[in-house]
Image (spheres, helix red, strand yellow):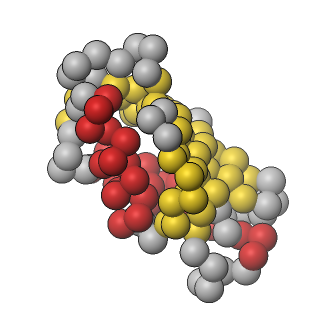
């Protein structure tokens, strides 16, 4: 199973972050399956890759450390694909979503850590 994680700190209030993230994931052609005030789960829409390569994106918003101007979020992107190649589909989707978060016009990126 391929799995990639990232942590981001952005300059936006926690009240505005969740709807902005839902919109961002939809713009990445991901189908948002579930969301709450501090969690979002989205899946890649079938059709472009085989079923085992379809990615699931989970975003956790850290409400405990959020301030009026900064919010931390963590992201996990995973699929059933074995990561036998460095440049696999899951990694490509992770890099794409990571770049969209880092370049979003809706907030200023303070910190980005990918693992």
Q: Position of residue 18 (x, y in %)?
A: 37, 42
Q: Position of residue 88 (x, y in %)?
A: 66, 64
User: Where is 39 relative to 35, above or below?
Assistant: above
Q: Is residue 41 left or right of residue 105?
A: right
Measured as percent of width and height from the top left, residue 108 is found at 20, 36
Q: Looking at the image, how many numbered discs can be counted on the residues?
A: 0
Q: Is residue 26 left or right of residue 31?
A: left
User: Based on the displayed image, in which of its 4 quarters is residue 29 positioned?
Assistant: bottom left
Identity of the residue drawn at 32% across and 29% down: 14
- Against 110, is 30 above or below? below
Seen as rendered, the residue at the extreme bottom is 47
Please state, as top left, top right, bottom left or bottom right, where the C terminus lies in the image: top right
Task: In this rendered view, identify the residue nearer to me: 10 or 15.
Answer: 15
Q: Residue at x 78, y 70 (%)?
A: 52
Percent x, y of residue 19: 33, 48
User: Residue visible at 62% across and 85% down?
Assistant: 47
Res 5 quadrant in image: top right
Point 41% across, 64% down: residue: 26
Q: Please, is residue 107 above or below residue 29 in the view?
A: above
* Res 67 → quadrant: top left
């Amino acid at each position: 199973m391929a799995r990639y994680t990232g942590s981001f700190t952005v300059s936006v209030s926690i009240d505005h972050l969740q709807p902005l993230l839902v919109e961002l994931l939809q713009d990445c052609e991901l189908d948002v399956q579930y969301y709450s005030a501090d969690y979002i789960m989205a899946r890649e829409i079938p059709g472009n890759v085989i079923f085992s390569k379809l990615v699931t994106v989970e975003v956790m918003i850290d409400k405990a450390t959020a301030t009026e101007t900064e919010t931390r979020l963590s992201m996990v992107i995973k699929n059933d694909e074995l990561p036998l190649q460095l440049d696999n589909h899951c990694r490509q989707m992770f890099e794409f979503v990571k770049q969209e978060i880092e370049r979003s016009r809706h907030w200023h990126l303070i910190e980005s850590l990918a693992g």
